[in-house]
Amino acid sequence: MAQDATRRARTGWPVLASLKAYRAGALPADLVAGLTLAAIAIPEQMATARLGGFAPQIGFFAFIAGSVGFALLGANRFLSCGADSTITPIFAGGLALLAATGSPEYQTFAVALALLVGILLVASGLFRLGGIANLLSVPVTVGFLVGISVHILVSQLPGVLGLPAPSGPMLAKLAVLAGELGHANIFTVVIGLGVLAVVAGCAAISEKIPGALIALIAATVAVIAADLEAKGVHVVGAVPATLPTPSLPEISPEKWARLIPLSLLIAIVVMVQTAAVTRAFPSDPEKPADVDRDFLGAGCGSLLSGLFGAFPVNASPPRTGIVSETGGRSQLAGLFAAAIVLALLAFGASLLQHVPEAALGGILLFVALRIIRFGQIALIYRQSLAEFLLIVATAAAIIVLPIEQGVALGIALSLLHGIWSITRARLVEFERVPATTIWWPASPHHAGERTSGVAVVGFQAPLTFLNAASFRADMQQLLQTRTPAPRLLVLEANSIPEIDFTAAQTLRELFKICAETGVTVAVARLESLRAQAAFERFGIYEVLPRDHIFHSVHEAIEALGGGKG
């Protein structure tokens, strides 16, 4: 089996998959898309690096590494991988508990974290664990983004207002900022809100317009022309003209171990977002997205990012959309954008030293407001109050608690929501559609017929320890209260994809009780291969004859003499 896995890995995940059958005629489109991507990415990567407490060039390193890594092993033709504002507040909050933000140790921990996240993502791709991307339900994901948005907004307000960044919990920071509003620097405020307005205005006109770059250049020119540094406007400062060089972090095994929980958390979030992006922008709309292979690409990007001295990277929905909308045909667009950023690092880093920090804050304010899915929140509120409360609970946890704990609680809430959904499944009675042999769940919306002495029931969920007790209670109540008492009980099993040990024992006991009370049992449409295997593995055929398994309810009723079906 190991050889088969290796063979699949070699044939299923070729290097530079997006360039397979590439034609030279697509090169101009990729160059245009790459140029547009670079114009969007340069200010965004600087701002995201600042969000995490890193120097601007570290954000560029992350973008170059993410672009090269994904191009090497990823499958999606459009996906842009690099520094991302969704995961940056999470790992920055976790790293701040281990070292002072901006310190050399903080940077070392970030590098180690990128390597761990890369390893986890590559492993998830190799072992085809794409299902992990479904750990977060839509309401939890929406609440998660609301919480992350609030963190970004609060973290950037001091820079936009020209105030010292307060410390402490989120609500305490807001209280301090509210009390200091009277001391805000008017020049800084104008720059920050002006950049926000320009970026938002350009986005409203067309996503192809590099509003962030336009606003950043305008703000930088204003700082130089009006000598705003002398008036309290803080700037990025000197950006070293250094190129990324491979290296490994030197930390003790104990410190590596302390990063494992945070790396698992970041890897799950990256999987969820990468899967969402690759499904939203498929390489071929007629084929399913290869999520597992894209995990490999994102993992390779994080590994290279760690080797280049940066932090974990993630798939970016807006940047991926830009590549797709500007006509990009392959990962050459991302590689071309990475080459432009590399050239900026090598020859134009001095151009960045007068960039005002408030401008980067304005860009991040736009990002924070944009990731809140207001439309989905309103839709969920109208259609499912319980799931709307799940949004509120997830957002509140991320806002009030330390951010990494809030995200972990959000994942736990998503899993609990899934478990709760399974536990809600109850036994359903079936009725025959008049003038047919079709048996259908009873409903007040259509007429149905029953056969005297026959009870047909179904269960529309996996039958597991989570709902076995309620299944048994419902079944016993039906047998005891049905008038006249059924002589034949047919379990329509089409909607039971899985049966675990606990549920199998429940079935055995129920089938024994039926036999003792003179009720014949049949199972119809046991179509799931896993459910069939459970019947064999757990010895259900010891209490249910094999010839009581039928392809349809009608066939079961005909064969076992319960009357015409």
Image: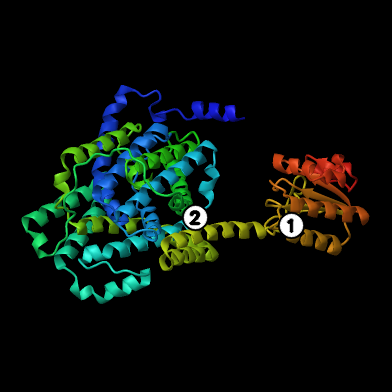
Please provide percent x and percent y for residue 91: 39, 55
* Amino acid type of the residue tagged 2 in the rendering: Val
Task: Tell me the quarter of the image containing the N terminus.
Answer: top right
Tell which residue pokes out farthest to the front in this image.
252
Along the line of sight, which residue is nearer the eye, 349 or 151? 349
Pick the front one: 493 or 556: 493
In which quarter of the view is residue 169 placed? Answer: bottom left
Viewer-side label of 1, 2: 1
Q: Between 235 and 198, which is closer to the camera in this rendering? A: 235
Q: Amino acid at mark 1?
A: Ala
Other-residue count near label 2 (Cα within 10 Å), few / some / many at <14 / 14–19 / ≥20: some
* Residue at the spot of label 2: 138
Give the camera-side residue of 18 and 349: 349
Q: Position of residue 318 (x, y in %)?
A: 34, 47
Other-residue count near label 1 (Cα within 10 Å), few / some / many at <14 / 14–19 / ≥20: many
**Residue at the disc numbered 1:** 468
| Left or right of 99 in this view: 557 | right
Vertical placement of residue 169 versus 410, above or below: below
Residue at screen point 33% across, 40% down = 247
Residues at marks 1 and 2, CA–CA distance in whole angstroms: 27 Å
Q: Is residue 265 left or right of residue 362?
A: right
What is the secondary structure assignment of the residue under circle 2? helix
x%, y% of residue 156? 28, 62
Residue 564 in percent (x, y) is at: 86, 46
**Residue 487 visible in image:** no
